[in-house]
Image: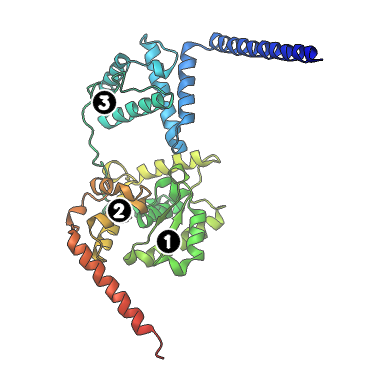
Amino acid sequence: MAQKIRNAHGCLRSFSLTANVVARLYGAFLLFFWELIMSRKSQAKHSIFVANSRTGGARITKTQSKLIGDRFVEWCFKNNYFFNSITDATQEMLAAYMQYLKMQGISVATQHNCLSSIRRAMKSLNCDPNVKGITAKELGLAPRSRVGTKMPIPDNLFEEVIKRACELSEPGFVIALKLQRLLGLRGLESMMVVSSLEKFALEANQVIKGGVSISDGTKGGRQRVTMIIQNKAPETLQTILEALLFMRRHNGFLIEGGKSGLKSAISKYHRLAKQVGLVGQYAPHSLRYAFCKDMLIELHDLGYNRKEATSLVANYLGHGDSRGRYVSMVYGKTVVHTLQIEKRKSRLDRAIMNIDQQIATHLTKQPKT
């Protein structure tokens, strides 16, 4: 009996080893077949697709990263640089490609963005680009400026833009521009803001002093809270009412393209923006710059110092409170130098004074026994 059991165990082990060998052979066959049917260029592009699927970030960012990678692969194979995966890219390839972009008149910032996208793809596939010398410094890229190219749109110019937009008979576009200016929304957010505006209206009694949640159209779907500029509160609420009334008549949309779908609406938005003169330093993003400038001034008048104000506005814009320095350099560059830099002792004094006032207020409200 014991011999039969040992024989059975031996058969099972033999079967297990055979199954393992068969599975490995099958995997090797599939890999060989995959490489056989795919060209090297297809394999390189597929590696970029895999790399993008492993990275996080907004959908539009991932789409752009894949487009950058595919363009790089196309250029490499056209110029006799062949490889099977983005991890096989060399410093020589990237240096030649960056030189090509420079000769095409591509800006330094865009060159850095392309390099950053390729480096990120390599890292996601467990390849360290630094070891290969694929860095901006090693490739000889000029330093990029982090100062934004846009400026806060002046109020008189914004009024002219709104007048031109009205002449185009596009009331939804007019409302979208106003929402961007008054709430600091991105263009896509202003087109997908219907649910947020409903929340605005349902909580109108809290809107003036409280924060309002924005989620649709944000980068990566990350929810954020924006605030209303106090001296523009009546205008903001009136614009929200106009938006809700318009969207009720147009199936919840402010802008509708020639075809159904968001892509067509976005194309129409950019086309209309150019027609009304929102280009260059006063492109649509300049509306967010203007919101930032007004909010920084308002927070400063309320007693916030420079660091506090820029951190809060960074949150309102959807960048996160750790991006206060970035907001200072880009969005608030025209006004941030006027904000107070508070010393630590002054901040402590102000905190003590505030808590003393709160204690005194609560003591006076206590009922007498």
Give the x, y percent position of residue 146. Answer: 25, 39
Classify the position of the C terminus by image quarter.
Answer: bottom left
Relative to 39, residue 317 above or below: below
x and y, in percent, of residue 205 in the image: 46, 70
Regarding mark 3 in the picture, which secondary structure is present there?
loop
Taking 201 as reference, is 310 above or below it? above
Q: Is residue 156 visible?
A: no
For the residues bearing labels 3 and 2, Cβ distance under 8 angstroms: no
Residue name at image x 40 percent, y 12 percent: 77
Q: Which numbered disc flags the more N-terminal residue, 1 or 2?
A: 1
Q: Which residue is mark 1?
A: 239
Tell me residue 231's x, y (percent). Answer: 32, 66
In this rendering, which labeled residue sits more in front, label 1 or label 2?
Answer: 2
Task: Say if 361 sits above or below 206 in the image.
Answer: below
Q: CA distance from mark 3 to mark 1?
A: 46 Å
Check residue 40 in the rendering and tell me which mark sits there, or answer none: none
Say which of marks 3 and 1 sits in front. 3
Sequence-earlier tag: 3 or 1: 3
284 or 138, nearer to the observer: 138
Q: Which residue is mark 2?
A: 311
Q: Give the amino acid at mark 2.
A: Ser
Position of residue 8 relative to residue 105, above or below, is above
Residue at the image point whose x is 27% and y is 53% from the top: 310
Mark-to-mark CA distance, 1 and 2: 27 Å
Q: Label 3: which residue?
A: 136
From where the camera sits, is residue 365 visible?
Answer: yes
Q: Which quarter of the image is occupied by the N terminus?
A: top right
Crowd band around label 2 with a 10 angstrom C-alpha radius: few (<14), some (14–19), many (20+): many
Q: Which residue sits furthest right?
A: 1
In the drawing, does residue 261 fall left or right of residue 183?
A: right
Outermost residue on the front side: it is 2
